[in-house]
Amino acid sequence: MRNRTVIKARISLFFIFVSSLFIICLSAPGAADAPPVSLGFSGPVSPEGIPSPWELKVKKGKADAKVVLENGEPALHMKSLKSSFSLEREFRLNVKDYPYVTWAWKALTLPLRGDVRKGSTNDQGLQFFVAFEGRKILSYVWDTNAPEGTVTEESVPWPVSLTIKVIVVKSGISDTGKWLTVRRNVYDDYRKFFNEEPPRVEGIRVQMNTQHTGGSAEGFFRNIIFSKTSR
């Protein structure tokens, strides 16, 4: 009888120990609790108004970009008149670990005839690019006329050899003047549009185009964040 009591006590202690370990594992900081990766515009600003470590790239015309405060937060203000330019920065990230990207943008003016579906009108007021190893890019755009959900492909032939999947995530002028937050699962988007597992991210870019239609655009970006969860 005494042996049975001892055995029962040991079994009870074992289950208490296992339960305690389980609770500790659930409450301990894990992968899902890792801090997000913030890629905003709060770095030191160059005499030209470009925040470090971002780099200005001008494709056509004149660039107008500078850091301003919007409600006390640093934001990138961009204006384009018959021009095409971008700010980009290099960094490395595995989207299997950080599948979600969130950013905030505000459009003040969109190119009137901008439409990603035609080369002659392929101007967008605001574009956000995620560049992957292997020269493949996801481009999220606010388009003036193409409806939300439109997806196009823009391939740049050799020797550049880029494959770009363009996704319209916002369309039209109804929400101009408002800060809007966009959240995408970049891991799922890459698998869906390229039909393969994504390699590492190697950089991001924000861009503005008005050179094809000869129009104008103005807007802002801020708070670009990669995270492990959708929160």
Image (cartoon, rainbow, N blue to C red):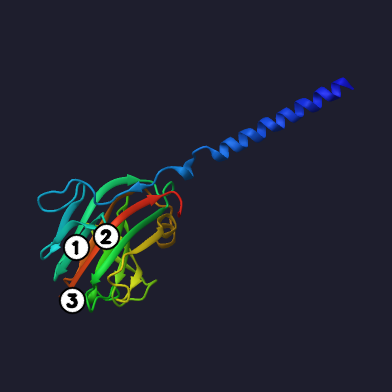
Give neighbour class at mark 2: few <14, some 14-19, many 20+ (Cα, 10 Å): many
- The amino acid on which the numbered mark 3 sits, given as a three-letter code, is Thr
Name the kind of residue labelled 2 in the image.
Phe
Q: Which residue is drawn at 46% across and 43% down?
A: 33
Mark 1 highlights which residue? 78
Find disc 3 in the rendering and name its residue: 213
Viewed as shown, does residue 20 lie left or right of 123? right
x and y percent of residue 201 in the render?
34, 49
Q: Which of marks 2 and 3 is nearer the N terminus?
A: 3
Which of pointers 1 and 3 lies earlier in the amino acid sequence? 1
Marks 2 and 3, how far apart at CA: 23 Å
Marks 1/2 in contact by CB < 8 Å: the verdict is yes
The residue sitting at the top extreme is 2
Residue at image mark 2: 221
**Res 78 → quadrant:** bottom left
- Answer with mark 1 or mark 2, whichever residue precedes in sequence: 1
